Amino acid sequence: LAKTTQPISMDSYEGQEVNITCSHNNIATNDYITWYQQFPSQGPRFIIQGYKTKVTNEVASLFIPADRKSSTLSLPRVSLSDTAVYYCLVANTGGFKTIFGAGTRLFVKA
Amino acid sequence: DTEVTQTPKHLVMGMTNKKSLKCEQHMGHRAMYWYKQKAKKPPELMFVYSYEKLSINESVPSRFSPECPNSSLLNLHLHALQPEDSALYLCASSQAPPSSYNEQFFGPGTRLTVL
């Protein structure tokens, strides 16, 4: 399974766009990039998943360059309620095991 | 209904006690998971069930005993735990077969303290 590397923490202010980059140098051809969000004392929540180029949903965008060795989660106009830990993981349809990376603690300030 | 429920929310137990954690989902998912999460660490996979059968046991000590009595329920039986087993225990479910690719729906967890 491809290992992921993310920044340990990030600070931002309300209304700003936040970009969290994840490195996954050993990603395999059939791997997808998946992001989860976790608030304190809650279980993780799926945010977005992609294979290449750009994926956008109502919550976030995911940018994946052609070599797929990294990906960037983009959160537009964050609010205080976006303060959470964001996990990047590499997933594939044949893999039973879900391995979460260390995660990025995002702290949004007023 | 996209909710996974877990009971109890909090549990304090002694090292000689026997207790059980319960997890329930009504999304029709046939893959269910147990994770353990220590403070400021990512969730760690413990067990995976697929169609009510144990698919993965991540070398978890036998003092943790999972059970999947039907497609909606998942239990984790605890016996003779150690203080280092204190953690947040998370249950999740997804479409089958179990896969890191499938979106997993997590419950809020049970905060376990072993004295």
Image: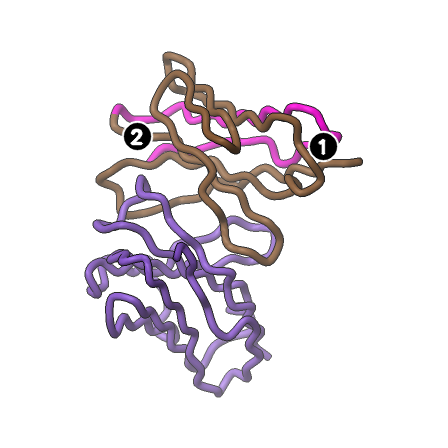
Location of the C terminus of chain A by quadrant is top right
Q: To which quarter of the image does residue A26 belong? A: top left
Please name the amino acid that badge 1 sits on: Asp
Residue A41 picture location, percent across and down: 59, 58
Q: Taking B83 as reference, is A90 left or right? A: left
Q: Secondary structure at mark 2?
A: strand
Q: Which residue is mark 2?
A: A31
In the image, the segment drawn in magenta is A1-29
Q: Earlier in the sequence, mark 1 or mark 2?
A: 1
**SS under mark 1:** strand
Q: Colour of chain A?
A: brown
Q: Could you tell me which chain the residue with mark 2 belongs to?
A: A
As displayed, is residue B105 above or below residue A2?
below
Which residue lies at the image location 24% right of the left edge and 71% below the top edge?
A: B70
Residues B4 and B14: in front is: B4
| Mark seen at residue A11 | 1
**Chain drawn in purple:** B
Q: Quadrant of residue A27?
A: top left
A62 or A70, nearer to the observer: A62
Mark 1 nearby-residue class (10 Å; few <14, some 14–19, many ≥20): few
Report the amino acid beneath label 2: Asp
- Residue B10 point in image, percent of width and height: 57, 73
Q: In x, y percent, where is residue A19?
A: 59, 24
Locate residue A45, reporting x and y percent.
Answer: 48, 46
Magenta-colored stretch includes residue A20: yes
